[in-house]
Every structure is written in structure tokens, then in C-alpha cells.
Image: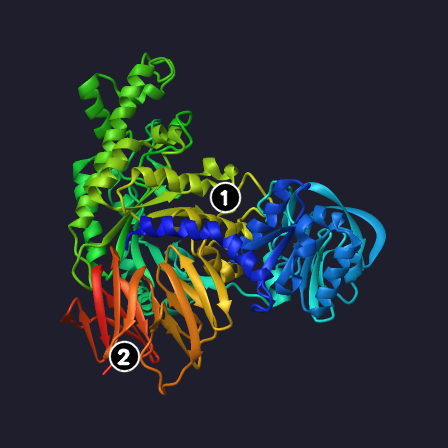
Amino acid sequence: MNFRAVKTCFAFFLLLRSIAQVDSATSEGGMGRHCVVLLSDRHALRDRNSIYVHALGAVGFPLVSVDLADAATFELKSAAALVVPVETGTAIAPELAGRIVAEVRAGLDVVVEGECALARQLGVAFTGVDAETDGAVDRRHPGVALQWSETLPFREFQATGLTVFCTDRDSGSALMAGGRLGAGKWIYSAAPLDAANGWGYGRLPYFHEAFLDWFGLEPSLWRNKLIAYLDWADVSSQNPCEVATKLKEHGIGEIHLSAFYKFADCQDAFRVFVEACHGQGILVYAWLELPMLSADFWERHPEWREHTATDAEAKLDWRTLMALEIPACMKAVKAEIKTVIEALPWDGVDVAELYFESPAGFEKPEAFTPMSGWTRSEFQEDWGIDPIDFFTPGKPHYYKDDPKGFRRFLKYRRALCLRLNKEVVEFVQSLKCAPFGAAPAIVLTLVDVLIDPAMSGYIGIDKGSFMELQRQMGFELNVEDPFTLWSNGPDRYKLIGESYRKEAKPGSRLTVDINIVDREDTRIPNARQTGLEFLTLLHEAACALDQVCIYSASSPYPFDFKYAGAALAGNAWVKWTAADSCEVASPFSVLLKMPTQGKAFSVNGQPWPCVSAGGVLLPPGNSKVSVSRATSTPVAMQITDVNAEFSSCTRTPTGIALKYTGRKNVFVTLDRKPARVEVNGVARELPDFQNGAFHTLCCPAGQTEILFVEN
């Protein structure tokens, strides 16, 4: 499938989406309550209205925006929920407030911010006491500190008889609570969800949980294909099979497993874990953290340890760096990599962060590499300068006094880094992996150097040469979310996507690696990205790039994974056109979530065999889905999961035909064991992982058509 063509077509559908949803929402009769409406005020701060667009969009609820001036003609019966930001609430006329309250009694759910007549009519009882707050406690996650960037005034209200979601962290007064009125429900927040220019997570990052749980809503589209790094040290004490099961529950479809420990000590556990992941349909990459190989290799080879510009051994942060520029060291490292890769059925290899130190710049010679004896000698032979002199104040070639000489060394350093990356990639491409004896898929992970050009000099990556290497060799690129851009907000991923799309080999799949960590520079709303901040990062990245990766599988709060699949659905959307039919547009495969037992489905007029208990799996592009009652008993064989971007799936007289194109192995789960499998017309035995009645088959990468024969 031409991905760019799909993206162009998809953009057109996005343009029409709001119009289509408003038309559907205001039509007579229609589908009942099915859209979420933002009641906006054109006279209010424009950014205020976008807060809820960001917050609810991150969990799969695009909003229909209706201005107060047009609200008199808007049919509230079509809305499942109505969101009223603080400035809109104070501007609502009594007549409209009365209409809203009447509709709540009939089943409409409402979110309202701040003291206003609408809040009072819904049942919020204000005490008349004015208070201030600069942080909250969410009752579902009381152990997570929520700190605000400013102190805000609020009017206290009675919480008796209400379901309280958030309280002031000091006084315990209710800040956000839910109530009932007739057939409908409401959520009242004493403080705005975020500052006027915020993304919706700055104050109450778990608002989405209250919204979805209290109103009984659930996102319709899911994409359970999160990529995550996994440090074996975080899970080594756990049962590998249970770890794989938990990863699947979290919506993780690809793991990059730390292959930088002493392999002899963890080989058996790795084997069990990789097989367990394959049984869950999860790809497993060997995560190499070069120029570190392992602590064991460091201890065995002190003669090859990298050095810094202070001539100290390069044991920096958690990495023990080896001097790969030394030919003997590189040869030994390759031998170790070969042992690791060929011992297990890896699906790919992640050559991660193979660059020089230090990202912090040239002012820290104690963290600057490479300065091995080999490097110093080679540069001195060519230019007559010992490069360590560039970092020795008082020397004639100190970098601040000899900028020309230092630029020459940085150029040499960038060329060396490029050569090392090329050599490692070529070597990994020469290896063979089970189960098909093919070269492993390769991804290179590096900190961004296109948007932040200063980083290029700091870590020794020449952006032009490196992207040319990517175009030549075709490896996938995983761009590490640079800490220098974190302050730019989640829309930085759009800039990253656009910048790398222009430079990468056409058709390349681009990934962004988001660091979920306890940050030192901010505690707002929490030191760790959580709740709507976590989900917004995933959502914005999914809208801008092809794949989303996090560091690491163990770093988010476990409850934050609950809606990760909805966030990763990005700009995919669904529009129900009748009670039994809908239209879906997506640039990637998605799950249309719904109960499927006892039902039959067709997609674009053809019987559809990609159905699980939780929903209907759809390919990229535009799909018209129809639902009917199942007439055959028992139901024919079905595909319940595919971890690839498949292009088509059709039911044949003998079974199911699936088409896909990809660099990676593909895992296909069926609800029963097929009698025979044909790959591109040839019968083949594929690795089969059984889980109860379900069978997950490992299928080869490439342009492939697989026929699963039922009888």
C-alpha cells in the first residue's frame, strides 16, 4: 500500500470530519446520543477552548465545537456529553442553561467548570467560602503528587452525596466531583482543567478517567502496538511468561530487550521470555547499547576501555564505554554480538545510541569521548596535535584558543562515528536469525540532531552523512525525544516527524522514542509523565510518526497503560452512520472496539474474518463496516490479532487470505489451528505458539500473501 497516498486521502477525511460529525449530530432521529460537544465562546481566549480538544482527543474523543451564538439551534439530543469550559459557563444565558439542565434530566452528561448558574442548576451547592489551591490529590491515585504551576482561587462546594474525584492537597476540600440529575450525570470542577495555553494535563491529569468512568464511555478505536524498551534488571526476579502476559495487557507489541548483560548468565531466561512474547504476538529485538557491550566485557578487557578528555576511563552514568575504534576491540565485540544474535530467535536488533559523549557539550571534558590512545595517535599522525590538548587550558591548542584545529577534530570525530555505525550495521545485516534464517530487522536509535544542530557536534553525529547512510542502507530510524525540546510541548513530535520525513529514505518507517522518567526540571503536574500528559505524548507522536516507542516498559505508572491503545490511534476516526454500520478512516491498522459474540461483520461489502472477542481489526485506509447477526454455527475460522500493517484480509472458500508487506516478522493469531498454511502459494510449516484454543503463527517478513486453510 502507498502510505503517502493513504496519508493524503486521510488528511482530506480529517478536513471533513468535523462537518460530518456536526451534520450527524444535528440530524433528526439519527443514532441517539453519540458525540461529545464542546460549548465554546468565540469571545473567550481561543486557547481555552483547545484544552478539552487536546485532553479528550488524546483518549479518542474528537470534539464537535459549537459556539454559544449557535447553541440555540443545536440539537442537544444528539450529544452524549457536553463540555462547558469556565469562561463559557459564565456567559450562558438562562434560557440555554435551562435547556441543558432539561436535557441532562433526559440523559445528557455534562462537564462544567467554575461557579456559574448552570453549575447551581445541576445541583452544585456552593458554600460561599473562598479558598486557594496549588495542587491536588486524585482519589484514584492518592500516591501521585499533583503540583500546579500557580496558586488559583476557587469557591468551595458541598461534597455530600457526590462522587469526589479530586481534592485540594492541603485542605482536602473537593475540587472535582460527579453528581446525578434524572437520567443524566454531571462532573463539576472548581478549577479549570489547565492554564489557557495548556494541553489539558497541567492540573488534573486524570480527568479522562473521571470522564470515561463516570459517564460510562469508552474509546472506539485502539492501536495496541506500542514499542517499549525493557531492562532485564527490572523484571529478572519475575516469571518471564507472566511478564510477557502483562506486556500484552499493556498494549505493547514490540519489546527491545537489554542484550548488554553477561549473556551466559541470562541466556536461558531470555529464551523463555522471547518464546513467551512470541506466544503473545510480541516482537522482541536485541537492544545493543554500543559502544557499551556489557559490564563483563568491560572487566575482561581493560585494554580496550574508552577514555575521556581528562584521560579517565569512560564509565559514564550507567554505561561502560568500549573503544570500538580500536580494530581488535571491534573484532571482539562483533564476535560477542554474533553469539548473542544467533543464539536466540530475535526478530530484530536495535543499535542504540552508538555515538560519542557528551550531550552536555564541550564544557565537561570529564564526559567527552573518544580519547583512547588509538584515537589520539591516529589524529596526531594526521594533524600533529594530541586531541587531549583541546581540553587542557593553557595548551596552545585549547579548543577556545584554536577553534580551527578543534573544528578539524570534530570533523574527524563525526567521520569516525559514521564509520563505526556503518560497520556495525553491515555486520548485523550479515547475521542470520531464527526462525527463518534471515537477517534481523535493524533499527538505529539516536538522539535528534536535525532539529537541535548543536547536539550534532556534541555527540559526533553528522546529520547529513548519517541520513545519507540511512537512505543507502534502509535501516529504520528511532529518534530519541531530545530533552532539549521537552519544553516545546507535545507538538514537538510534529516537527520531528516533518524534519525526518524529508531526509529519510522514502517509505521508511519512522519511530520516536519517548523517555518516561522522573524529571529534574519540573514537578508539574508530576515529575513523571502521567495521566493525560503521558497519553497526549503518545497521541501527538502517533499523529506525527509511524511508530511510538517508550523508555521504558517499567517506567510509566501501570494504570497509565489502560488508555495507551486509544492514544496511539492518533487521528484515526469512526463515524456511525446507522445502528449497524460505520465508517473508519485510519493511516494504520486499528481495532474497532465492540462486543462481537454472535455477530458477523463485513468490510467494504465483503465478509470480514479479522474479528476478536474485543472488536474488529481493520487495515489502513477507509473501511465501511457493517454488523449483522451471525447465521452460521459454528463460526468459521477467524484471525483475532495481527501485529503488522496488513493491506487486505479476505475469506476464501477454504480459509482466510492475508496480505502484508513489512521488514519485521509478523505474528498472526487465529482462534483455531489451521489445517494448512501457504506462504506465497507454497505450503509451509510456521512456528506455532498455542495458547488454549488460540494459535499464534510466526510469519516471514517481506511482501507476503498467506493462506490459512481451515479444512
Residue 202 visible? The answer is no
Q: Amino acid at mark 2?
A: Lys
Specify the label residue 673 is tagged with. Answer: 2
Q: In the depicted view, which residue is nearer to us: 572 or 536?
A: 572
Dot 2: few (<14), some (14–19), or many (≥20) neighbours within 10 Å?
many
Q: Position of residue 659 (x, y in %)?
A: 25, 64
Residue 618 appears in which quarter of the rendering?
Answer: bottom left
Dot 1: few (<14), some (14–19), or many (≥20) neighbours within 10 Å?
some
Residue sitting farthest toward the right: 128
**Which residue was labeled with disc 1?**
490
Residue at 18% x, 63% y is 436
Q: Position of residue 428 (x, y in %)?
A: 20, 49
* Vertical order, 208 against 408 (above or below): below
Residue at 58% x, 61% y is 25
Q: In the depicted view, which residue is nearer to us: 281 or 220?
A: 220
Q: Amino acid at mark 1?
A: Pro
Q: How many marks?
A: 2
Q: Answer left or right for 247 relative to 268.
A: right
Residue at 35% x, 21% y is 391
Q: In the depicted view, which residue is nearer to us: 345 or 514?
A: 514
Q: Position of residue 265 (x, y in %)?
A: 29, 59
